[in-house]
């Protein structure tokens, strides 16, 4: 039985959609046990279930609270209680679609970092025209130093190899030109560190190459990474809406899109972020899945399944072992 | 007659596509005169034309050269010669799809900045679900201080008002959360400056709100701005390719898309960057249009027309006048 601690209070559509997502996941998977962590009022809406334990927490964290505020002023929040369940060894993973800064702080504070990692980072798996690509950091660290980017690269490459099963994944540094000399101060310095590393580093990659699959690991600071993800969503949504408007004006196009419905649905499933269900926070001593703030029931269900898969695969043990084994002097120096 | 200096040697598809773009623009517009600046060999391919003057330049700048290198080692480059034509008062604007860092350096060095501007910036006009939005800076300044972002906001708002004709454009600061406290160090500081300004500042906007049209001016540093643009292109291209693959697998969908062809073509024209033809560098004493590095003939034709429109509208005079008139103390302090 895989045991997941779910923060019922986190996310724009909490608690309703979070509970609905748990319901779906439990129905679809018989080897799943869910700790629902939230206020008694929120939890009362969920029917009793043999593979559910309701864990009451009287407080919850809003999306706009700062981590220090939330940790100090709300010691009994649902997100913190979820992490305690992992710390106590009762749950194997935390899933939250809530305030990601607070989730990050709880992970550092209650689970701690893996040896050799100074900055845990969010790894988002993106669909591309070739292999899936890992974008790291997708939002945990907004102000970074060059060696943090090297750490992200190392963790991203290990994740790509050990979890996604890609051999010698190509690592690219997100920048504004393909030549090594191009980029801001941070990226130029990180470029030098990456060139000296033992990674399969292919140099700078531009934003337009993320989705064409030029690299299996895309490295950037968390500010840039998060903006990339949100811009991607925004472009996809705006294009869909613009296309809808054009089609609506033209009866032949309406008919045509009706005929193409099956292909359009397959396309939508392939490109919808809800299908990808949450991103792991790598480098902490536990499985932590950060869901999208806008998560609906489907996204929550997928985030729970992502967490389950990483627990089954032994994500943390694999990462820890691989970090221990790395011997290249410049990498070790950088991550110590 | 509007006179444009065109750098024939700049861009991934130079000189062929650049010349082809000039040819199209000249054919479509009778009040256009083009200085073609490039090597004699490149220019020899262009037929003689009454509204063309060929200006030979023996050197050209590659895409990967640094500005200081290019300015020092290639005093007779085509891009530099194009700027001299504006400086001499013969041409009203420069158009180049070449190395944008070198174009920026030539603009500073040969044309100079407008009074009160310390960092000229690239303003890209983006289609959204509502009004067109100006993204500034789209790539000229990769490492910025908070008051540079304030300057970009001021220039972007003036551009939106005076050139795009929008009243009291809403100015948003690109960040990773809507709350003012969220973002990296640079953005948090810039947020405070923008709050004190007399602009119609609406606070942080997230990446996914760029294309939904939440703000008419989106402010960011040039590194983030350029990545946003390139990611947007990449998403649009990858989605189109994924959709194509799905449709190809399904005969009904192929038929359906055939019926929808007219709507699809209209959609493509609305969303293709080639239609938008180059972005102005704001804050320098002249009209400078920076074309996309991948420009084909159509993109070059559009960039020339963009330059022509800005010359006709008196972009530089309007911006200069509006900058002079600004009286709000905190803004003046910041841009001095």
Image (cartoon, coloured by chain):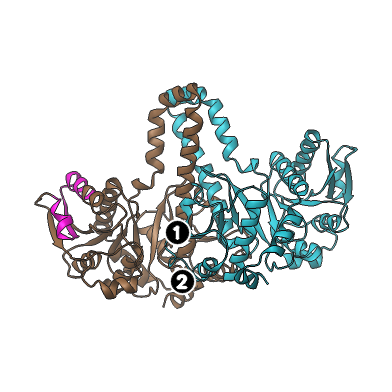
Chain colours: A cyan, B brown
Q: In x, y percent, where is residue A100? A: 70, 57
Q: Which residues are magenta?
A: B21-46
Element type at mark 2: helix
Tell me the chain of label 1: B
Dot 1 alpha-carbon crowd within 10 angstroms: few under 14, some 14 to 19, many 20 or more: many
Dot 2 alpha-carbon crowd within 10 angstroms: few under 14, some 14 to 19, many 20 or more: many
The number of numbered badges drawn on the structure is 2
Q: In x, y percent, where is residue B49? A: 10, 50
Dot label at residue B226: 1
- Quadrant location of the C terminus of chain B in the rendered image: bottom left
Q: Nearer the viewer, residue A264 or A183?
A: A183
Dot label at residue B148: 2
Which corner quadrant of the image does residue B85 belong to? bottom left
Q: Nearer the viewer, mark 2 or mark 1?
A: 1
Q: Is residue A29 magenta?
A: no
Circles 2 and 1 on the same chain: yes
Element type at mark 1: helix
Q: In x, y percent, where is residue A60? A: 80, 56
At 13% from the left edge and 58% from the top edge, which residue is drawn? B54
Dot label at residue B205: none
The answer to whether B32 appears left or right of A266 in the picture is: left
User: Can residue B105 be seen in the rendering of this structure?
Assistant: yes
Q: Is residue B30 magenta?
A: yes
């Amino acid at each position: 039985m895989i045991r997941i601690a779910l923060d019922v209070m986190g996310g724009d559509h909490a608690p309703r959609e979070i509970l609905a997502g748990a319901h779906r996941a439990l129905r679809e998977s018989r080897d799943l046990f869910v700790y629902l962590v939230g206020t008694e009022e929120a939890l009362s809406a969920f029917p009793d279930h043999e593979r559910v334990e309701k864990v009451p927490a009287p407080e919850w964290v809003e999306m706009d609270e700062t981590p220090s505020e939330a940790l100090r002023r709300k010691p009994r929040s649902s997100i913190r209680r979820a992490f305690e369940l992992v710390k106590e060894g009762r749950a194997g993973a935390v899933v939250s679609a809530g305030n990601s800064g607070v989730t990050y702080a709880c992970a550092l504070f209650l689970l701690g970092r893996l040896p050799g990692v100074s900055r845990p980072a969010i790894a988002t798996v993106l669909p591309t025209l070739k292999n899936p690509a890992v974008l790291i950091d997708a939002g945990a660290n907004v102000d970074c130093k060059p060696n943090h980017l090297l750490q992200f690269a190392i963790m991203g490459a290990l994740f790509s190899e050990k979890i996604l099963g890609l051999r010698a994944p190509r690592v690219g540094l997100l920048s504004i030109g393909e030549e090594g000399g191009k980029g801001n101060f941070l990226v130029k310095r990180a470029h030098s560190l990456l060139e000296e590393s033992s990674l399969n580093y292919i140099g700078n990659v531009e934003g337009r190459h993320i989705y064409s699959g030029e690299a299996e690991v895309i490295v950037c600071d968390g500010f840039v990474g998060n903006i990339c993800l949100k811009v991607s969503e925004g472009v996809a949504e705006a294009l869909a809406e613009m296309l809808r408007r054009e089609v609506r004006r033209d009866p032949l196009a309406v008919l045509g899109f009706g005929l193409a419905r099956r292909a359009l649905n397959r396309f939508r499933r392939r490109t919808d972020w809800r299908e990808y269900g949450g991103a792991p926070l790598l480098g902490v001593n536990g499985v932590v899945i950060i869901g999208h703030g806008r998560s609906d029931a489907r996204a929550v269900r997928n985030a729970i399944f992502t967490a389950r898969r990483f627990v089954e695969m032994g994500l943390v043990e694999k990462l820890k072992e691989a970090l221990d084994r790395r011997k290249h002097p410049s990498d070790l120096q950088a991550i110590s």
